[in-house]
Image (cartoon, rainbow, N blue to C red):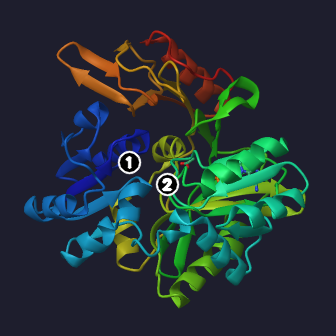
Amino acid sequence: MKVLLLGGGGREHALGWKLSQSDRLSQLISAPGNPGLGQLGETLPSVDPTDVAAVTRLAVERGVDLVVVGPEAPLAAGVVDSITAAGVPVWGPSQRAAALETSKAFAKQVMDEAGVPTACWQTFDQVDPALAYLRAQQPPYVIKANGLAAGKGVLVTTDQAKAEAWVSRCLGGGFGERRIVIEEFLRGPELSVFALCSGDEAVALEPARDFKRLMDGDKGPNTGGMGSYSPVTGLPGGIAAGVLADVIKPVLKTMMNDERPYNGFLYVGLVLTESGPVVLEFNCRLGDPETQVLMPRLASDLIDLIEASLGGRVAAPEWNDLACLNVVLAAPGYPEASIAGVRIRIGDLPDRSLVFHAGTGEDHNGIFARGGRVLNVVGTGSGLAEARANAYAAVKAIEFPGALFRRDI
Ligand code: AMP
Ligand code: GLY
């Protein structure tokens, strides 16, 4: 089977790595891919995965049997609709279904309709009513730009002046669409639950936890994610099954009723509050850096799982008994002003470790950092302590001057 994988981050390298283990894979083509994916098959660095026409042409001309979409931007652009219309099987939600991620106000409406617990909210497109509402709330304030903002559109602050400035920035078009959601602050640890969905059927994957703040002790700015681990210990029993029954299935049903059948991976961001799990957000894809710790744990063949789901028969995945922990190495200056061009040398890695590329480039002198999150260093082991020791031992084997990483994953 010839598979075209869209995207070029750490999540996609982990997906490509897992797809490559399938006996059924004959060729992996990644667009744009990255140097890590380049070790697994062909990469097409000049292809923009959000260029719907180009990607559809590629899928048809190269005669691929399956397209797997990693990130949200191509989904938001409608690649699934176009590739489906061209008659090529593709894994990911349609543009209309991806609205669960691309519009926070839409996601909130669906949650209300489906009776899913979420923070109280209001949406605004005018500054004055938004400020009046904000001033009537208790801090901390939570203000979210409605559309896709690459993780940068959310402000959580106790500072009213900053909150008001954020409202003005979003409604002034700072993140594209002039619309915001203001919502209640939720207290508790966060958890990501993922599912494979096909219409109104779904199965949960294993939970994972990511680390959003830049610095140790959850200090510093929010980032795309500085590390992750799975399994997540100390969770209330049966949490994934509970989220499947109480969140995912009702949402899928509401989406079906709205003629937006949802096929693909679904990401549910939760806060585990004192009164139970409450939904923060949906994403219409797998998490990054969570995928990097889920794929090494997945015992089932990923092509089989996807193919069954595309046929409307979701099958429960099987898992091995590994624990995985991922330490992200980011470019100096990340997230505000990443410095590109630093040379990287990956030395001899410990046995139970893996490196997934993200913001790397390659030239005749080897690998270098292009910026952002650059490498995902994953340790595996029979428990999290061993996985952690292996991950940090692997970090030591990598020469990447000035790399930013957390020491407390
Ligand atoms: P989102 O993109 O909606 O997941 O928001 C990004 C991050 O902001 C989340 O992972 C949380 O850490 C934080 N956040 C968002 N909404 C809330 C909320 N209602 N209460 C507390 N923290 C929040
Ligand atoms: N791990 C956060 C995300 O993928 O959105």
- Towards the viewer: 222 or 388: 222
- Towards the viewer: 401 or 131: 131
Residue marked by disc 1: 15
Q: Quadrant of residue 82?
A: bottom left
- Towards the viewer: 103 or 57: 103
**Some atom of ligand 2 lies within 8 Å of the CB belonging to the residue at label 1:** no
Q: Amino acid at mark 2?
A: Leu
Residue furthest toward the left? 61
In this picture, is 389 found above or below 269? above
Q: Amino acid at mark 1?
A: Leu
Residue positioned 51% across, 86% down in the render: 256
* Disc 1 secondary structure class: helix
Q: Quadrant of residue 280?
A: bottom right
Residue positioned 80% across, 55% down in the render: 272
Q: Are marks 1 and 2 in contact (CB under 8 Å)?
A: yes
Find residue 102 and report its horizontal and vertical position in percent: 51, 64
Task: Check residue 286 in the rendering and tell me which mark sits there, or answer none.
Answer: 2
In this picture, is 44 found above or below 251? above
Residue positioned 63% across, 78% down in the render: 110
Comes first in the chain, label 1 or label 2 = 1
* Left-right relation of 263 to 230: left
In this picture, is 179 found above or below 159? below
Spatial CA span between label 1 and label 2: 10 Å
Find residue 8 and report its horizontal and vertical position in percent: 33, 42
**Some atom of ligand 2 lies within 8 Å of the CB belonging to the residue at label 2:** yes
Find residue 236 and report its horizontal and vertical position in percent: 80, 56
